[in-house]
Amino acid sequence: MKSMSNTKDMTMKQWLHNKKRRSYSVILLIFIGLCVTVAVSLIGILIGFILYRGLGHISWEFLTTARSALRGTIGILPNILYTFYLIITTLLIVLPIGIGAAIYLNEYATNRRLVRIIEFTTETLAGIPSIIYGLVGFLLFAQGLGLRVSILAGALTLSILSLPTIVRTTQEALRTVPLSYREGAFALGATKWYMIRTIILPSSIDGIITGVILAIGRMVGESAALLFTAGTGYALVTNYFQALGTSGGTLSVALFVYATEHGNFNVSFAIASILVIIVLLLNFSVKLVKRKLRKVK
Amino acid sequence: MNIISANKLSLHYGDFQALRDIDLDVPAREITALIGPSGCGKSTFLRTLNRMNDLIPGVKITGEITYHGEDIYAPQVDVTALRKSIGMVFQKPNPFPMSIYDNISYGPKLHASLSKSELNDLVERSLHGAALWDEVKDRLKKSALSLSGGQQQRLCIARALSVSPDVLLMDEPTSALDPASTMKIEELMGQLKQDYTVIIVTHNMQQAARISDKTAFFLTGDLVESGQTDQIFTLPRDKRTEDYITGRFG
């Protein structure tokens, strides 16, 4: 209001050509521009440095063999397989539970207070440091259930770790479906489950898949929760069911092991660049999924 | 003959009473218009007729609604069957995010397993019934969301017709549409009443006067007056009805 009173002392030209107001916005614009530049270039430098240090050490042999102490060669095929097994197993466990829970919370639960408590709990779970999940998983699955340090124990731990993310992203996707679709289906005599199956899930599938891909990205990058539960094994096991019972280090864990136990940073950076590429690909696939599945709508 | 009757129907949302002792008979194969200012309970009443209010938590209904003499709130009533017989068209067109064809075949697939050709026939008949066939017959596989607002609303009418209901509930079906589309839907309703009982909620009193046979006037949860549309609009018995239809409030 103060500036308004100034109009009395100014000509209209002075008022309209107010330099002070304009210079404020120019300063702000420069500041914001700087922030963006710093943020983008940090990411750029980080990715560029990792790829520069790592890509040169990746060879066909590196990707397709197991490490051999006798021959003194290093290969990460087992770690690639373990990462893959772990993700598949985790998804098999967490998707039915997580998506089912989200559907229940969003479509069936009538006790709003209970829903709020559950949502608060899942959000809190999502904020717990993953090393704690590792510790709990070790005590609960590896020792308590007698699964020992194995891919299965790791997958169960990762399932708990990613459950909150899956529940939340699925719930958010379900919430985007307008009430009018539900009403339209009910008014035709659809039962609730039929409506969910034919209307709600198809029209929220892009959001659900996006959430799953982002969760996979987190699994790929997870190390702390797996160190105690899935372990650091590097023997080549191609049989999936046999692998479930063996200790196996994922790529992220292998990165850690090579850097700390062997001091071999060339291998660590090679693995790091593979991880960066995987995560970038996953993020691009999110965009692709959104575009492809949106078209159906 | 009355197809639907409400007897002493009251409805509460929690502590708030939205409908108070409503008695109303709906004659078969006529258009009954429910009019009244916003918040008077006319849409709430409409939604009790196919039990759409069941979806809202905290709703309590007392009194009785009979459909062909049967109490629709009796515990053994199959809501699915009730909603198949009493179809509904909403204020905002709400086609599903799928093709025109799939929108129409959605309902029939729910209730019966039909062959491909039976479904094709049904889709064509329903679209004819909603006077939409000629406009969409060449693009049945296109997304229903590509249609104009007026076409989408007629698609929703066709979708409601696809399960061969006996009553059509329409909740301000033209309030989101332009005048040309509104006229098409009004004309369509004139045809529909030959085969269906239509109950329409409308804000537009001219619309009620133009198309309906019977009119019921709601005010703050009470049914003030109901009767033949001619009588309501020319010789209202209640002072409040007269004030409303002459535009003194609302």
Image: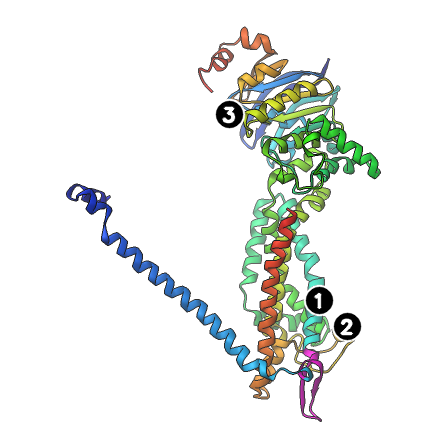
Residue A150 percent across, percent down from the top left:
71, 75
**Closer to the N terminus: mark 1 or mark 2?**
1
Dot 3 falls on which chain?
Answer: B
- Asked if the magenta segment contains residue B221, the reply would be no
The answer to whether residue B236 shows anywhere in this view is: no
Question: Residues in magenta?
Answer: A62-79
What element does badge 3 sit on? loop
Q: Which residue is mark 1?
A: A88
Q: Are marks 1 and 2 in contact (CB under 8 Å)?
A: yes
Q: Which residue is mark 2?
A: A240
Could you say which is closer to the camera, residue A41 or residue B94? A41
Q: Where is B157 relative to A93, above or below? A: above
What element does badge 2 sit on? helix
Spatial separation of the CA atoms under disc 1 and disc 2: 10 Å
Crowding around mark 1 (Cα neighbors within 10 Å: few <14, some 14 to 19, many 20+) is some
In the figure, is residue B70 to the left or right of B228?
A: right
Give amino acid for label 1. Answer: Ile
Spatial separation of the CA atoms under disc 2 and disc 3: 64 Å
Quarter of the rendering occupied by the N terminus of chain B:
top right
Give amino acid for label 2. Answer: Tyr
- Asked if the magenta segment contains residue A76, the reply would be yes
Identify the coloring: rainbow
Q: Where is A211 relative to A258, above or below? A: above
Q: Which residue is mark 3?
A: B38
Residue A258 percent across, percent down from the top left:
60, 84
Q: Which quadrant of the figure has residue B137?
A: top right
